[in-house]
Amino acid sequence: MTASAVERFANFDDLVVGYTSVMRREITAASVDAFAQLSGDVNPLHIHDSFAQAAGFSGRVAHGALQAAYLSCLFGTQFPGPGCFWARQTFEWRMPVFIGDVIDLQATVKHKSAGTRTLLIGVEARNQQGQLVMNGDGMVRMLAKVAGAGERAGERAGEQG
Amino acid sequence: MKSPLDERVQRIMADVFGVPVESIHPDSSPETIEGWDSLQHLNLVLALEQEFQVQFTPEEIETLVSPERIVTSVGQKMIVMELN
């Protein structure tokens, strides 16, 4: 870990109720296949068009948890960003998501608790047609930078490098 | 006789801890309510803040360990809010 990475802790003070962040992701066959391999969820509903069609869908259905993975990316890298700890999340998957769909994941601060450094976040995902495909509520805790930790990490990196 | 504030706090605590409202007594505490651990204490604080539109300081959070203390703390904050 470099010193610059440690300094990039998200600033809790900058986050206010109503703050919204959006991340867009295209659902590709490669991403679905990779998630199936990573998670071990090779349910043919996600893998084979023929199986999905036999179940009444137009084609392979992307894992709902793939949206969760993208939400993890949103929380961890964009909003709130580095230093946050994803503590709780609910999901309601309202519509199937298919290969080729483009999903907008939106996270909005519903409540900010300064004393606990915690955010309650409302989450929605909509497809390219604006249809709600997922919604839920999450709780994210904002870790605080430990004084001196960055310098120690930088020193260790220097020793190894 | 319980005040409306007592009843609101009692209901919130019952919801958070997943216990019957009747099991929440004025002196209930983390020692008497199973599952009242640090995570549930966080959930309780968040629920109280949202319900009453207040914020607790870290020092105040440590004191919210019984319905009686919660009612006192919330009541004081609501008085300050009304005065402002």
Image: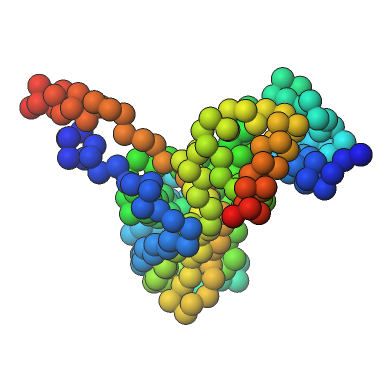
Taking the spot 62% from the left edge, 28% from the top edge, the residue there is B63
Q: Residue at x 56, y 45 (%)?
A: B55
Relative to A51, is B71 above or below? above
Residue B80, placed above or below residue A50: above
In this rendered view, identify the residue nearer to me: A81 or A74. A81
Instruction: For the C terminus of chain B, give its image quadrant.
Output: bottom right
Q: What is the quadrant of residue A70 in the picture?
A: bottom left
Residue A75 lies, with reference to residue A94, above or below; the image says above
Residue B83 visible in the shown view:
yes
* Residue B53 drawn at (x, y percent): 61, 52
Q: Is residue B71 left or right of residue A155?
A: right
Q: Quadrant of the N terminus of chain B?
A: top right
Residue A73 seen in the current view: no
State the residue lying farthest toward the front. B83
A23 lies left or right of A56: left
Outermost residue to the right = B1
Q: Position of residue A141 (x, y in %)?
A: 46, 41
What residue is at 53 percent from the left and 67 percent from the top? A133
Q: Quadrant of residue B47?
A: top right
- In this rendering, the answer to whether B14 lies above or below A51 is above
Percent across and percent down for residue A108 are 47, 60
Coloring applied to the structure: rainbow
